[in-house]
Image: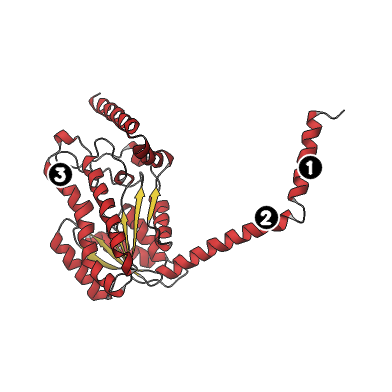
């Protein structure tokens, strides 16, 4: 009499015989080979696309911007590093040029110091970049500030400050460089938005509003410049382990100065920078760089808005209670 254990053992033997048969093994190896070749071709295409390309990165001195500078430099791009702190930009330049961990020809980065909240400085910076290089292949709008506070307590000047840096600044820089891209019928505009450009969470009103505006503007831009063969990529990360929350502004305009738990547990900026590089190399139109729950929240907001609103109201109550305790 054949026992259950014997039947299972025989079944395992038959499965292994099938897998190792001359018909299946070549198929498996062939699939692996095709996949590996596909990934190799993707990397080669990304490398060819970015090698010697003029890449402008705003907010390059810290956090995600700094890591993006590293990966784009390693890819062989001609970097234009932008920020408010000249010394920090020069320090990053020396750090990159001292690196030997590259397999392609690299170029010493060029730095431009300006504040995205200053419209006149933006125009001058764009003119300086175009005069130096003649064109821009990739504009990476990365610079931004965050915000923490209750709407009822927040001065309108704070809302304006966040919008100036997160929305009007990138828009102004993009508009300043766009005509040269259109003239060449070539260029790639990239913007680091946020998952909060898709959904809004309590006590982040100014930040979420700026990112919603950013999402809308660059979606419109993508449609309008498609005829000129210009690429537009919007990336929406979740929490990233950077100093963004430490430097956030509060309701009265002061610095928040706290590393939020969600930020501390966020993704490494090194990993996110690699995802940014891959998205640019593949000319992706939009990429969500968030964990499962924030990604699901986007669909929940669309498919079950009532439930989403209830969850956000509950979150607001808990956060308010936590602050008052």
Using the numbered discs, state the Cα–Cα distance from disc 3 to disc 1 in whole angstroms. 69 Å
Residue 215 image offset from top left, x and y in percent? 29, 51
- Counting residues from the N terminus, which is met first, the one under dot 3 or under dot 1? 1
- Counting residues from the N terminus, which is met first, the one under dot 2 or under dot 3? 2
Residue 144 shows which numbered tag? none
- Counting residues from the N terminus, which is met first, the one under dot 1 or under dot 2? 1
Tell me: 47 left or right of 182.
Answer: right
Q: Is residue 279 above or below residue 7?
A: below
Residue lying at 39% horizontally and 49% vertically, measured from the top left: 288
Q: Please name the residue that numbered disc 3 is placed on.
A: 158
Residue 194 image offset from top left, x and y in percent? 32, 47
Q: Is residue 36 above or below residue 181?
A: above
Using the numbered discs, state the Cα–Cα distance from disc 2 to disc 3 in whole angstroms. 59 Å
Among the 4 quarters of the image, the one containing residue 316:
top left
Q: Is there CB contact under 8 Å for labels 1 and 2?
A: no
Nearer the observer: mark 3 or 1; the answer is 1
- Label 3 element class: helix
- Label 1 element class: helix
Q: Please name the residue that numbered disc 2 is placed on.
A: 28
Residue lying at 55% horizontally and 62% vertically, measured from the top left: 38
Image quadrant holding the C terminus, namely top left
Among the 4 quarters of the image, the one containing residue 154:
top left
Q: How many marks?
A: 3
Q: Which residue is more in the foreground, 90 or 48?
A: 48
Q: Rate crowding at label 2 as few (under 14), some (14 to 19) or many (20 or more) other CA atoms within 10 Å.
A: few
Tell me: 104 left or right of 19.
Answer: left
């Amino acid at each position: 009499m054949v026992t259950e254990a014997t039947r299972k053992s025989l079944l395992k033997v038959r499965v292994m015989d099938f897998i190792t048969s001359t018909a299946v093994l070549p198929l498996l190896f062939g699939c692996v080979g095709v996949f590996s070749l596909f990934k190799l071709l993707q990397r080669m295409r990304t490398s060819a696309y970015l090698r010697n390309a003029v890449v402008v990165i705003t907010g390059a001195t810290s956090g995600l911007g700094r890591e993006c500078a590293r990966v784009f430099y390693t890819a062989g791009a001609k970097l234009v590093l932008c920020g408010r702190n000249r010394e920090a930009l020069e320090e990053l330049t020396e750090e990159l040029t001292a690196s030997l961990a590259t397999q392609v020809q690299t170029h010493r980065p060029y730095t431009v110091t300006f504040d995205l909240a200053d419209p006149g400085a933006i125009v001058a910076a764009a003119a300086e970049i175009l005069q130096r290089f003649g064109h821009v292949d990739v504009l990476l709008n990365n610079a931004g500030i965050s915000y923490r506070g209750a709407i009822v307590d927040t001065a309108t000047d704070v809302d304006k400050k966040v919008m100036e840096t997160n929305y009007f600044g990138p828009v102004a820089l993009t508009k300043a460089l766009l005509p040269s891209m259109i003239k060449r019928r070539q260029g790639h505009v990239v913007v680091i938005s946020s998952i909060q450009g898709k959904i809004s969470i309590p006590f982040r009103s100014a930040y979420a509003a700026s990112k919603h505006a950013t999402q809308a503007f660059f979606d419109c831009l993508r449609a309008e410049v498609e005829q000129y063969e210009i690429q537009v990529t919007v990336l929406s990360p979740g929490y990233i382990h950077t100093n963004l929350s430490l430097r956030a502004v509060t309701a009265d305009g002061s610095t928040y100065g706290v590393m939020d738990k969600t930020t501390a547990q966020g993704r490494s900026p090194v990993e996110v920078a690699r995802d940014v590089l891959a998205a640019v190399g593949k000319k992706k139109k939009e990429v969500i760089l968030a964990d499962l729950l924030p990604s699901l929240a986007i669909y929940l907001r669309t498919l079950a808005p009532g439930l989403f609103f209830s969850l956000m109201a509950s979150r607001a109550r808990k956060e308010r209670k936590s602050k008052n305790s």
